[in-house]
Image: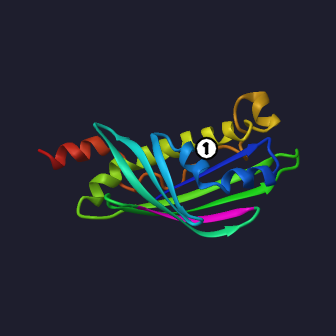
Amino acid sequence: MLNVKRELTVQQSQSQVWDFVGDMGNWARQMPGYVSHEVVDENDSVWTVQFNMGPFTRPCIIDVHVLRWAEPSEIEFSIKGRHDPFQGHGVFNSEAAADDGTHVKVDFGMEITGSMAKVISVMAAPVLTKLADQMVVRMGQSLGGPAPAQAASGEPSSKEAATVADAQPAGERRPLSKLKKIFR
């Protein structure tokens, strides 16, 4: 399983952050490669995004289902590729920060399934990392930018820095060399 964790602190109050994330369309529009989305009901939406995985670029339809809304601080969700072999699970958390801002954490795991899972996982790991980085930056911008401590230095503090956990499967550090061996 591929996992990413991201954290940031924004200048908005926790209730303002909740107002933003309470609309699934706002999440979808933060996705790099966003094409469109459709809200099916209060817990389900369908997103279309354009993914770039190395030499491959293609649209992907993703079913997003909210498992739990815990206002004002947590949303648990799952995703599944409608025509692509992957599924995932994530949690969005927020808590009031000392400076009248809000500390936001996103934890997401994704599993590639199917007969090509091992090969696709190698290519997907850096893509997932890049998507998470870009989505958090966009979310921060949409929520009024980083908190004053981050804005002063232009970089997140070590506590608020974006972190990656297990983004690349162990033993798969040289994906291109692995692919070359497979297709020889």
Residue 8, placed above or below residue 41: above
Q: Is residue 177 above or below residue 67?
A: above
- The stretch drawn in magenta includes residue 74: yes
Does the magenta portion include 153? Answer: no
Residues rendered magenta in the picture: 73-80
Residue 25: percent from the left, percent from the top? 58, 50
User: Badge 1, how many Cα within 10 Å: few under 14, some, many 20+?
Assistant: many
Where does label 1 land, which residue? Answer: 136
Colouring chosen for the image of the structure: rainbow
Q: Nearer the viewer, residue 58 or 115?
A: 58
- Quarter-of-image position of residue 136: top right
Q: Amino acid at mark 1?
A: Val
User: For the point 76% across and 35% down, which residue is it?
Assistant: 150
Q: Is residue 173 left or right of residue 2?
A: left
Specify the principal SS of the magenta part. Answer: strand
What is the total number of numbered labels drawn onto the structure image? 1
The quadrant where residue 56 appears: top left
Estimate the x, y position of residue 29 in percent, counting from the top left: 55, 44
- x, y percentage for residue 12? 80, 44
